[in-house]
Image: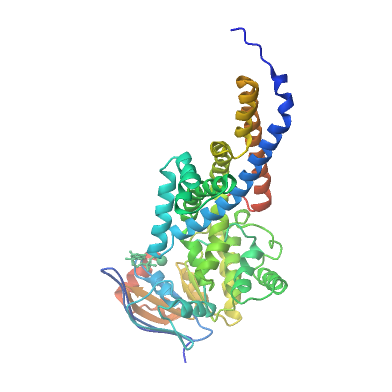
């Protein structure tokens, strides 16, 4: 059974038909890269998976949990689905460690000591063991994004959604964030990445999903898709971005 | 103009001024704390998805901000007894001040809340927090920090505005000044001394708030 199963999902913003029957199955431990032009619905798809956006038709399952328009169910779902944003969205009034600790403390009701130890462990894992008490404003973009990843991991999600998480970074900081993703892949984490980093998608991603006009236009093993794109749309997309 | 300034004439009334100052500080502290509490709840109510709640808060805020303070005070002290609600001058004064600060600070705090990027709410939802938890732990603290200078000014306005409650015979600083003036006829001296005391209280209050901000806001300016 796939970990994430997306079945004929349609999403409208008012009149705007944004997702036009998206089908996608993601197995546990898989790393999926979603690529495609601006406006093709990549972010919207990710946001439907964790319930930040509702959809009108179709079904999404994470494990055996259906994504439904119900507050309580969505809160439960959010424990299985982590998300990292392009703009980090760290809590500016909390230190790196406090950012990581907040959800385990409030949502999982773990005690403070346990959360502190968890925060330390996770921040060390992303290479920020010396920044526990730093505020986001005093961290570089790459460091902030790694704190954001640690914050998501603190809820032990089954799948991590990443929406262009390196796009807001200076080029020299991209590597450190991608390195953390590679590490997560090795540990068997399921990753769904919307990305403009084609090299990373090819080298680290197991599978590539090319979205076009609200549909999964073409999909396949990463190396094959990049070496041998089938549809003219993907061919032209790749020729532009490369 | 050969008026002989006579500050020494006020010396016998030292303790009158002192107890006036005490009362001014007391009602200021109480109504600042309660007023900010009311303001926070109202700001939360104002942004609520529940239309009725948001409307109630909006009506309260607009009514309070668009009528004179002294009329509100008189209504509470002289008007409400007609409905059977009799309040002491102290109670009426506090209620009026809390009402006033509640409405003004609600608008200030709301501005701070609305300035929170959408991503902050989304990050909270993604982590599985409830609306209430997001509001209290993620949105509110930076909101306070953003609007802190405006809030401080509003609280100082409340302290200065508390002089109006002398009108219902609450024995605070301005009441003391009126009393001393009526006994000594030293109007010039009484009121200039009172003005200087208010000035000092305002400066003191501002410094207390600055100190408080150092304890409350550890993160760099947002
Ligand atoms: N909150 C919203 N309200 C209305 N329309 C929206 C909203 N968010 C996205 N859209 C529309 O949905 C479509 C898909 O947007 P989406 O953000 O999913 O694209 P994307 O593939 O992520 O693009 P990009 O590469 O620029 O991030 C666009 O036409 C966009 O205008
Ligand atoms: Mg996007």
Q: Is residue A208 left or right of residue A76?
A: left
As rendered, which of A201 and B102 lies closer to the eye? Answer: B102
Residue A71 lies, in percent from the top left, at 45, 76
Residue B50 lies, in percent from the top left, at 40, 65
Residue B64 lies, in percent from the top left, at 44, 47
**Is residue A20 placed above or below A123 in the rendered structure?**
below
**Is residue B193 placed above or below A235 in the rendered structure?**
above
**Is residue B167 placed above or below B145 in the rendered structure?**
above
Residue B44 lies, in percent from the top left, at 48, 59
As rendered, which of A228 and A221 lies closer to the eye? Answer: A221
Q: Residue at x 51, y 62 (%)?
A: B120
Ligand 1 is found in the corner quadrant, namely bottom left
Q: Is residue B59 left or right of residue A123?
A: left
Furthest residue toward left? A15
As rendered, which of B157 and B94 lies closer to the eye? Answer: B94
Hey, which quadrant is residue B163 in on the image? top right
Of the 4 image quadrants, the one containing the C terminus of chain A is bottom left
Q: Is residue A112 left or right of residue B120?
A: right
């Amino acid at each position: 059974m796939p970990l994430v199963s997306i079945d004929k999902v349609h999403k409208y913003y008012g009149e705007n038909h944004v997702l036009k029957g998206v089908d996608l199955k993601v197995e546990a431990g898989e790393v999926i890269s979603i690529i495609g032009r601006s406006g093709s619905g990549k972010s919207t798809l990710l946001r439907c998976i964790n319930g930040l956006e509702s959809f009108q038709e179709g079904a999404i399952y994470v494990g055996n949990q259906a994504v439904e328009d119900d507050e309580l169910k969505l809160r439960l779902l959010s424990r299985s689905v982590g998300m990292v944003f392009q703009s980090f969205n760290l809590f500016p009034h909390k230190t790196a460690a406090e950012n990581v600790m907040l959800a385990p403390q409030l949502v999982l009701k773990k005690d403070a000591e346990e959360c502190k130890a968890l925060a330390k462990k996770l921040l060390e894992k992303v290479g920020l063991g010396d920044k526990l008490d730093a505020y986001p404003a005093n961290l570089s973009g790459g460091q902030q994004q790694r704190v954001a990843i640690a914050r998501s991991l603190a809820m032990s999600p089954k799948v991590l959604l990443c929406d262009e998480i390196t796009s807001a970074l200076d080029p020299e900081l991209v590597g450190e964030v991608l390195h953390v993703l590679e590490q997560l892949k090795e540990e068997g984490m399921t990753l769904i990445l919307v990305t403009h980093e084609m090299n990373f998608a090819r080298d680290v991603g197991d599978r590539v999903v090319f979205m076009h006009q609200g549909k999964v236009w073409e999909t396949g093993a990463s190396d094959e898709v990049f070496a041998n794109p089938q549809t003219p749309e993907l061919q032209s997309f790749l020729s532009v971005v490369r | 103009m050969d008026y002989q300034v006579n500050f020494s004439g006020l010396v016998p009334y030292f303790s009158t001024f002192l107890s006036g100052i005490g009362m001014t500080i007391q009602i200021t502290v109480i109504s600042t704390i309660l007023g900010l509490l009311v303001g926070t709840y109202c700001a939360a109510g104002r942004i609520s998805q529940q239309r009725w709640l948001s409307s109630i808060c909006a009506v309260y805020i607009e009514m309070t901000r668009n009528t004179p303070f002294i009329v509100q005070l008189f209504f509470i002290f002289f008007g409400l007894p007609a409905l059977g609600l009799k309040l002491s001058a102290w109670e009426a004064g506090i209620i009026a001040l809390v009402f006033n600060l509640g409405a003004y600070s609600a608008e200030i705090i709301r501005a701070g809340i609305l300035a929170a990027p959408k991503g902050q709410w989304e990050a909270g939802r993604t982590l599985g927090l409830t609306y209430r938890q997001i509001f209290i732990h993620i949105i509110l603290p930076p909101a306070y920090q953003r609007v802190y200078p405006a809030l401080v000014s509003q609280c100082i306005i409340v302290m200065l505005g508390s002089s109006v409650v002398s009108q219902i015979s609450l024995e605070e600083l301005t009441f003391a000044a009126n009393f001393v003036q009526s006994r000594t006829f030293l109007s010039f001296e009484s009121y200039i001394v009172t003005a200087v005391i208010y000035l000092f209280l305002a400066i003191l209050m501002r410094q207390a708030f600055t100190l408080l901000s150092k304890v409350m806001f550890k993160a760099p300016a947002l």
